[in-house]
Amino acid sequence: PLPAPVLVATTNCNGGLKELLALDDVPSHDALWHARCPDNAEFAAEPLPAVRGRARTVHWFDPCELLAPDARSELKPEHRRRQRGGGWEPAR
């Protein structure tokens, strides 16, 4: 049996599993990111539902590294824009 009714799977860009969380309820986007990167003021300090289980694979790394202003990207600077909280997305 699973330790909680909600599973949150974190994957890398190739679909490889990095982390699996078992939670009591569906988390909001901000609650999940605030729990990962509590020093990032762009994510509301919403509480994360109770974590009943967590597993990390060898592919896991600190996701806050992706949000730094100098975070690496496969997108050239002229073809990307910063997302809320950090990180990059294609420019529109």
Image (cartoon, rainbow, N blue to C red):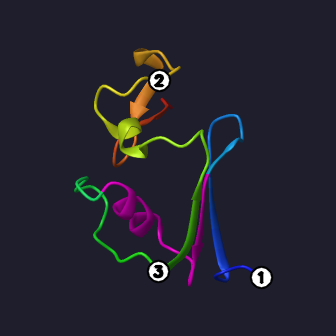
Q: Choose between 24 and 73: the one closer to the eye.
A: 24
Assess whether mark 2 and mark 1 are in contact (beta carbons under 8 angstroms).
Answer: no
Q: Please identify the quarter of the rendering in which residue 44 is found.
A: bottom left
Density class for disc 2 (Cα within 10 Å; few <14, some 14-19, many ≥20) is: few
Q: Mark 2 highlights which residue?
A: 73
Does dot 2 land on a helix, a strand or a loop? loop
Instruction: Identify the disc placed on residue 72.
Output: none
The residue range painted magenta reads 19-37
Q: Please identify the quarter of the rendering in which residue 54 is found.
A: bottom right
Q: Which amino acid is tagged 1?
A: Pro
Q: Position of residue 57 (x, y in %)?
A: 62, 47
Left or right: 30 in relation to 69:
right
72 is higher (above) or lower (below) than 62: above
Marked residue nearer the N-terminal end (1 or 3): 1
Front label number (1 vs 2): 1
Marked residue nearer the N-terminal end (1 or 2): 1
Q: Mark 1 highlights which residue?
A: 1
Q: Which amino acid is tagged 2?
A: Ser
Residue at the spot 59% in from the left edge and 39% down from the top edge: 59
Front label number (1 vs 3): 1
Cα gap from disc 3 to disc 2, whole angstroms: 31 Å
Residue at the spot 60% in from the left edge and 40% down from the top edge: 58
Q: Is residue 81 magenta?
A: no
Density class for disc 3 (Cα within 10 Å; few <14, some 14-19, many ≥20) is: some
Cα gap from disc 1 to disc 2, whole angstroms: 39 Å
Instruction: Identify the disc placed on residue 49.
Output: 3
Does dot 3 land on a helix, a strand or a loop? loop
Q: Position of residue 40 (x, y in %)?
A: 25, 53
